[in-house]
Structures are given as C-alpha cells and as structure tokens.
Image (cartoon, grey):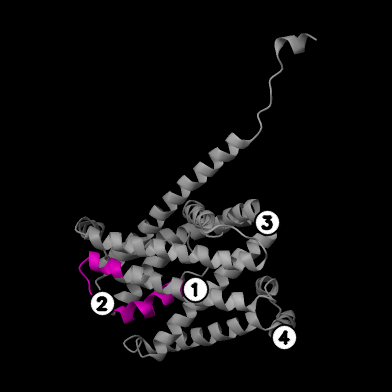
Amino acid sequence: MKETLIRVARIVVSAGLLFLVLRKAPLSDLWTQIQQADVVWLLAAFGVNSLGNVFGAWRWQLLLRSQSRIISMPYLYGSYLVGLFFNNVLPSSIGGDVFRATGARKKGGGTLTENLTVVLVERMIGLLATLTLGGLAALTGAAKGLDPRITWALYLALFVSAAGLYVALSSSMRALAARFLAHIPIDFVQRTGGKMIAAFELFSRARGTLLANYVLSLGFQFLLIVHFYLIQFAFGNSLPFSTFVVVVPLVFFVMLLPIGINGLGVRETAFVFFLTPAGMSETSALALSLTSYGIAVGQGVLGGAVHLYRESRERAARPKIQEPTDASAEA
C-alpha cells in the first residue's frame, strides 16, 4: 500500500511539473520548434549518445573483469541497451539494472546480488564523475554567470566527488565511514551508506580498475554534455559549450532526487530553470530536454529489439518435451 502511494505521488509530481513548464512553453510553440528542427544535428546527437553507451558498456566490462567474469563487449553493449529499454518502460530507473545484472549472471556467472553490486558501483562512479565535471566547471569560472549559490553548490560537488573517490579506494576510510554511519540515527542513511560501502568493498583489491573506470566515466559524462550541446543547434541556439558543462551535471544531480517518474518533469523543469538565464528561450530549453529523452527512448527501442532476439534464441535452445505417442499411452 505504501509503495503504491509513493508511486502515485511521484506520478502526480511528474505531471504537475510538466504542467507548470508547459504553461511557460505552450504546446503549439513547442510543436513548431520540433517540426523545424534540423535533422542533421539530431542525428549527430544520436551518434554521440550511441558512443557514450559504448563507454558505458566498457566501464561495466572493466568492473566485471576485475571479478574474473569475462564477457564480450558486443554482449555487454546489447545488455546496456536492454537496461535503457527497461529504464524507459518501467516506473523506476532501477528496473533496467536488474535486467543488466541478470544478463551478466547468465553469461559470466556469479550471483544476481554480486552482479547488481557491480552495476551499483558503475553507477556510483558515474555520479562521482558527473560531480567532478560540475565542480571543475565552477573552478574554471564557467559558472560565473549563474547564481553564486549554484557556484558554491558546484564547489561542494567537487569536494563530495573527491571524498567519495577516496572512500572508494581506501579500505581504512571505508571502515571509518562505516563507524560514522553507525552513529547516524536515520535508518535510510544507514542502509544506503552501508550498501555503498559494501559495494566498494567488493573491489578492495581492484583499485586500479576503479581509477580506470573513473577516467572512462569522465569521458562518458563529457560525451553526454556534447550530446546536449549538439541538440541545441537543431533548434537554432548557439550557447557556449561551457554553459552545458555547468548545466548538464546540475540537471543530473537534481534528477537524483527521488521525485517524479524516471526523471520526467524533473529533467524538463531543471533544464528550463538553468538554461533560460543563460539566454535560451523556455520553449527551446523544453524542446532540448524532450528531444534528449526521445533519443534515449530510441536507444531503448534498440535495446527492446535485442531483448526480444535473446529471449527468442533462449526459447529455441530449450529442450522440447516430447508428447507421448498413442502407442506408448496405450502401453
């Protein structure tokens, strides 16, 4: 009952945020923008997004290999797309992770929990990389045109990223963090922090792999920023690249808040909020956000096709149960 109420509340939040942002950017104006979009720039953004997914599968492969699970890149790339598909169709961004972990277990062995832990670590390192890019943007002065409070938030993000990476790599820091969590009287914080520490403990002897994964994650996040930067040209905008280096990490940080369904509404509101002060119209900012979501859905459709193909092959490979013949039945 509680989970149902939470899900309904998140749907209401997503719908409410979309309603509010559409009041600022009417549907008629939005539709006109989308109709006039330059397809060449959209295809370029789709290509960069696809390359980013290759980086994502590569990060995943490195973590699995450190646990002695050797799985080919083509298979993991397909599984990465399958995860995107289920993230888009299920009312939670965690659902796709379960399908990814299940596929890795079938191909490389281990328990489902172990494979889910690998995916969790990949996600957390990706978050640290996102926070790093946002913090570096603040240090370079790229965020100087924004609210000073946002700049300080980016500085904090850089600190959290550095501290998180240090905890991930240091066994003594993980032990200290665990003792600190034990004194926090908030059950949610204890459970979440405990899971994160336990997840990184699995890689206690693979610090080189974690560092390599972090570097790849920086590349992955950089491509994600380029993806949004290219989409703006499809709608006739030309904000500097530095603006997106600041805004994209901020948007994805906001999307971590447990509100809305799959970030719908939250993402659109955040892009409108951060891009309009930089000089983009509300309609263009909304079009950019929805187009990016459409590209993610397109990648997910490819993942759905991969999932159906794999399921059909598995069914075909299962031994068929022989029906008893009339003669054997009479005997």
Task: Single out the mark in the foreground, 3 or 1.
Answer: 1
Task: Single out the mark in the foreground, 2 or 1.
Answer: 1
Give residue 216's mark: 1
From mark 2 to mark 4, how far is it between C-alphas? 45 Å
Task: Single out the mark in the foreground, 2 or 4.
Answer: 4
Between discs 2 and 4, the one toward the N terminus:
4
Between discs 2 and 1, the one toward the N terminus:
1
Q: Is residue 26 rendered magenta in the image?
A: no
Name which residue lies at 65% across and 71% down. Answer: 192
From mark 4 to mark 1, how far is it between C-alphas? 25 Å
In percent of width and height, residue 326 lies at: 71, 10
| SS at mark 3 in the image | helix
Q: Quadrant of residue 213?
A: bottom right
Between discs 3 and 4, the one toward the N terminus:
3
Q: Is residue 237 rendered magenta in the image?
A: yes
Between discs 4 and 1, the one toward the N terminus:
4
Q: Are marks 3 and 4 in contact (CB under 8 Å)?
A: no
Three-letter residue code for mark 1: Leu
From mark 3 to mark 1, how far is it between C-alphas? 25 Å
Give residue 239's mark: 2
Q: Nearer the viewer, residue 12 or 282?
A: 282
| SS at mark 1 in the image | helix
Q: Which residue is mark 4?
A: 172
Magenta residues? 230-253
Name which residue lies at 34% across and 60% down. Answer: 46
Q: Which residue is mark 3?
A: 112
Three-letter residue code for mark 4: Ser
Q: Is residue 265 visible?
A: no
Task: Single out the mark in the foreground, 4 or 1.
Answer: 1
From mark 2 to mark 3, how far is it between C-alphas? 44 Å
Between discs 3 and 1, the one toward the N terminus:
3
Answer with left or right where residue 114 lies relative to residue 251.
right
